[in-house]
Image (cartoon, rainbow, N blue to C red):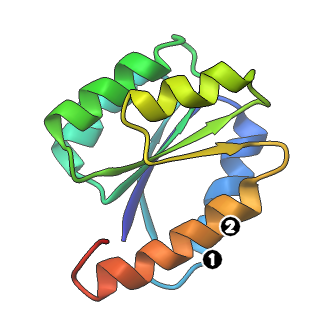
Amino acid sequence: MQIYYVGDAGDVRSTVTSLLTGLNGVEIVGAAASAALATDDILLLRPDVVVLSTQLEDSATIATLVKIKQELPAVVVMILAEPPPPHLRAQYICAGADFFFENTTEVLELIAVAEQLVAHFDAGSLV
C-alpha cells in the first residue's frame, strides 16, 4: 500500500512515517510540507492513502482534501490534526476525509487503521 504524507510538523511527520514504514506492505512514496508541493505529486503518483496534516506551511488542508477527493475519489485520506474543536472534525469528514485522528492522542489508532487497510489492499478490495 502506497502512502503519501503531507504536513510540516517535522517531529510528527518523522514519528508517523517511521511507524507506518514499520508495517509490512507499506511504502511511503512521498512527503511534502505544503499543499502546493504535495497536490501535483499526489495526482501523479496516485497513492492508495494520503495522510494529510492540518499543520501545513500554506494552511490549505481542506482545499487540498477536496481537490484530492475530486480527482482521485478512491484515495483514502486520513486527517491528522492538533486537538480540534468539535466542529472541525465534522468539517473535514463532510469535505471528504475518510478518517480523522488527533496527532497528540490518536497516532496509534491511525497506525492500526493503516494496518487494516494494508490487508484490504492486499486482498484487492477496499470495503
Residue 111 picture location, percent across and down: 64, 66
Q: What separation in Å lies between label 2 and label 1 (alpha carbons)? A: 5 Å
Q: Quadrant of the N terminus?
A: bottom left
Q: Which disc, if any, is residue 22?
A: 1
Could you tell whether 46 is left or right of 13 in the image?
Answer: left
Contact between labelled residues 1 and 2, with CB atoms less than 8 Å apart: yes
Residue 19 picture location, percent across and down: 68, 67
- Name the residue beneath numbered marker 2: 19
Nearer to us in this view, 1 or 115: 115
Could you tell whether 82 is left or right of 21 in the image?
Answer: right
Note whether 30 is above or below 1 in the view shown.
above
Note whether 113 is above or below 10 in the view shown.
below
At x 70%, y 63%, the residue is: 109
**Secondary structure of residue under mark 2:** helix
Q: Quadrant of the C terminus?
A: bottom left
The kind of residue on which mark 2 rests is Leu
Note whether 50 is above or below 28 in the view shown.
above
- The answer to whether residue 86 is seen in the rendering is yes
**Secondary structure of residue under mark 1:** loop
Residue 46 picture location, percent across and down: 22, 51
